[in-house]
Image (cartoon, helix red, strand yellow):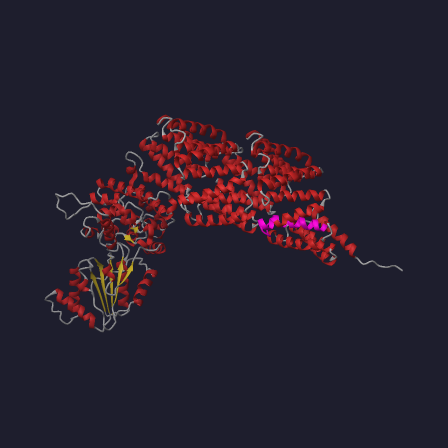
Amino acid sequence: MGAVPALASAFQPRTGLRERIEQARADHATLVLTQVLSGGGGVGKSQLAAAYAHHALSEGTELVVWVNASETQQVVAGYSDVARRIQASGAGGQDAETDARAFLAWLAVTSRSWLVVLDDLADVEEIAPWWPPPSRAGHGRVLVTTRRRDALLSGGGRAVIEVDAYTPAESMAYLRDRFTGAQTPHLLDVQAEDVVRKLGYLPLALALAAAYMINEDVPCTSYLQVLTDCELRLETLLPHQADTEGYGRQIAAALLLTLDTAQQCNPVGLAAPALRLASHLDPAGHPQTLWADAAVTRYLTTHRSGSTEPAALPPSDVTTEQARSALRLLHRYGLITCDSRHGPRAVRLHALTARAARETTPTHDVPATVRATADALAAIWPETDHTDPDLCSVLRANTDTLATHAGDLLWQSHGHAVLYRAGKSLLSAGLYAAALTHWHHLATTAGRLLGPEHSDTLTARANLGTAYKEAGRTPEAITLLEQVVADAERGLGPEHPDTFAARTDLGTSYRDAGRTPEAITLLEQVVADAERLLGAEHLETLAARNNLATSYLMAGRAEEAITLLEQVVADADRVLGLGPESIAARANLATAYSEAGRTAKVISLEEQVVADIVRLLGPEHPDTLTARANLAISYREAGRAEEAVTLEEEVVADRERLLGPEHPSTLTSRNNLALSYAQAGRTADAIPLEEQVVAGFERLLGAGHPSTLTARNNLAVSYKETGRAEEALPLLEHVVAGRERLLGPEHLDTLTARANLAASYRQAGRGEEGITLEEQLTTDAERLLGPEHPNTLTIRANLAFSYLEEGRAEEAVPLLEQVVVGRERLLGPEHPETLTVRNNLANSYSNAGRTAEAITLLEQVVADTERGLGPEHPYTFDARNNLAMCYKEAGRIEEAIPLEEQVVAGRERLLGSEHPDTLTARANLAISYWQMGRAEEAIPLEEQVVAGRERLLGSDHLDTLTARYNLAASYRQAGRAGEAITLLEQVVADAERVLRPAHPSAVAMTDTLRSWRRANKPRWWHW
């Protein structure tokens, strides 16, 4: 009884939703099951109810009643009609309410099966007396559809099931079935998924759109072009004439059906303006806290309609509580969803409902709506994104949506602050490609609406330059910033703050591009202007001096940088007290100390920086994480690898939690952790991590970004240091090509990449190619950086090392002597880099047969290293190890052994027993024991070396083969000839397989095996 709707064309069973409905039915404890299907307009509630009604009839349910419940009187009239038709006791036909009660009484006592559907229930309060009663026989069921979400609906034992739009799969299935049924399957093309997504998977919208496409023979691709046209109204896109299922309402009216009723409910007159404001935000959700902002409550106050206050009185201000009540009102009437469980996306509405609300907003109200929405978004944005990155992500999405709908309304006399805040947030989140797009659009729009020299235009262009730089497009950044500086000087004047900021940005970009002379010239001008205009102790002046000092560092002028930074720290402390500025200056000063070799000061200063910044900004501020990361690097450089690993693992975990696993800063932290793993001898942990970092940077920033190239470079170095030079070479060749393309052939990073490539050529047995490249590098560095620049000296030292490797010691010695003189003059005799090159010079003397000179120099190096860096520093152990080697070459093995024992004990203590350097020290000591005939002491050491190298490098690595060979020699010396020959046979077989039989090492091992076999044969007596 009643008009049960026919099932729509291409009806979708919606299996997941129906399973939830059936589960609610199974869980219900009362004798009559009342289920309420609640959802917004057009989600298909009535169609679901109709499907249940048809199913009930087909299954033999004896009475199915369908009642239009949009008005309570219609419910009463429907009940009354059914009562008369079934001849219910007490239904006399004289009074509709009496007959309706008779029907309800019949439902309670009948043994027959029944289903009552109350479709489109509108008034939850008025329906209260007319809920069907429990069925004593347990054969009754009530199904209700409604847009309301009132608590009353879930009272009385009723089960509420939320009905939402189709799933993407259901939407595609609907279009496919609909077009197939209409014999127009060609309309379903490659853009179908975009069409259903644009329609928000709303069943009503899909039905109207499908009918339109069928009527007009328009495929999905063409329809999508129409659908994305913001100028067209919903009635054009989804016309009423396409209502082939008899829905009966235009799309906008259907979606906003309950708005007029909600507008009359408390708080009166707020539903419509609240919905209009929400409609300009992201349909996927916005924060509920936005509705507590003063901009929103002011807007609701001025746009309230239908107030019950006397017209002569000014409207009372809308309170925060009333604004929240308006939200809940819209939620109850199914116009929005307000659910605090969704966090920063607590307030959501369907995209088509939003579009309908915007289209029905009076034109004169739109500017105020846009302005209030933008003001509120800007007001609730955290000062720094790290405090709530999820909220900031949502705010960016809402700003994008608002900007799309607002057009030029956000550019009345200036660009609205929220647009600039969103761009800064993109940069902070490491979303550089999106930041480029955003700032390019802002710069273009500002130029068009405000003029090219307006301060907002210049700010947008300057931020675009920053985005270019962060995206690895530094040359484009510099070109743009040079234009910005010129325009700012012309339009605003050379002394305007925005001009000052633009010149600073350009100077730091020059610095980052390796154009340090230009950076220093410009930043020195900036400092001079700042001191003249603002005073030497102004915050901007201190920042300018800080930037200049970092440029001095880049130019190898560490002492000048230190002098300047010490002044900045003193001035910042005196003028500002402990604050971000003084902490930043201290952090840079620590870096300068490190560059100058003042290692004793570096760690204590950085530990103080970490303590201060935690106290000032908290443990999770991005600057705190950066300070902790810098401290970890200093621990690593000081040889305190385990402390570095512990701290970097903490930083990685914190950045993953706070910034996300794919943020550039997180990837950089992982890269640093891998370097510390490598130094700690944990190459098995380091290389997989570096491989992940390379993949992450490629995915996030692209293969040509400087950070990606740096990560590839580090991975290649790890491959090289673990004997995988053949794998390192293509990576490094790619890095060199990428840096030459991105930074130019003369950039310092390019020179570094070419140096690493040369070292890999050398390790891969292509020594002459390596030397050729390093000779070119030396010439280029001397020309570009000057012969005394620290990097020039490093490149020259690398060339000398290659000469040594190729047996050209006589050429290596004069080069290293030059490097020693240069570093002593530039850095002092006890700087770590000076000590390293003196160490290398001593090795060159040794290789050139000048052992006495080598020993004299190394004894000085050991003493200086112990005094300057401490007896436990890795460099100290390296120097002792090299001195021991020279003692052995001079036949002074007795003096070598105590030194080597110290090195073994120290490296075990400092690096751990499994570190490659520890294994090398053990191997050297074992050889000395063997040379002294102490094979029994050598064997345990060599067995440890073999086991460690097999674990770290694999059994086929040349270093492992060498260790096994040495162990066999010790077995033989100890009288264990059988074990010695068996082991050497295995080593020879592996060497011939891995290295090829003609390899010099394989040949030498084979010759040794033959001699051992001959010596081990029994001697025959001849009669």
As for residue 911 lying within the magenta part, the answer is: yes
For the C terminus, the image quarter is: bottom right
Task: Please tell me in which quadrant of the rendered image residue 847 appears.
Answer: top right
Asked which quadrant contains residue 870, the reply is top right
**How many labels, in total?**
0
**Quarter of the N terminus within the rendering:** bottom left
Region of the chain picked out in magenta, as a range: 906-930
Q: Which of 357 and 932 is in front in this view?
A: 932
At 72% across and 44% down in the image, what residue appears?
A: 892
Question: Left or right of 102: which side holds 889?
Answer: right
Q: Where is residue 22 in the image (x, y as percent from the top left)?
A: 31, 65
Task: Residue 184: give x, y in percent of width and height.
Answer: 34, 52
Would residue 603 be visible to someone looking at this image?
yes
Q: In this view, which residue lies farthest toward the left?
A: 94
Question: Is residue 975 magenta-colored?
Answer: no
Residue 234 in sight from this viewpoint:
no
Instruction: Pick whichever, 86 or 37, lies toward us.
Output: 37
Q: Which of 678 and 1018 is in front in this view?
A: 678
Does 986 sit above or below residue 706? Answer: below
Main SS of the magenta part reads helix
- How far from the left and from the top, in percent, is residue 335? 25, 52
Is 887 in front, or is 773?
887
Residue found 70% across the figure and 45% down from its top: 895
Residue 107 sits in quarter: bottom left
Residue 516 position in % (x across, y down):
49, 31
Q: In this view, does 582 lie above or below 279?
A: above
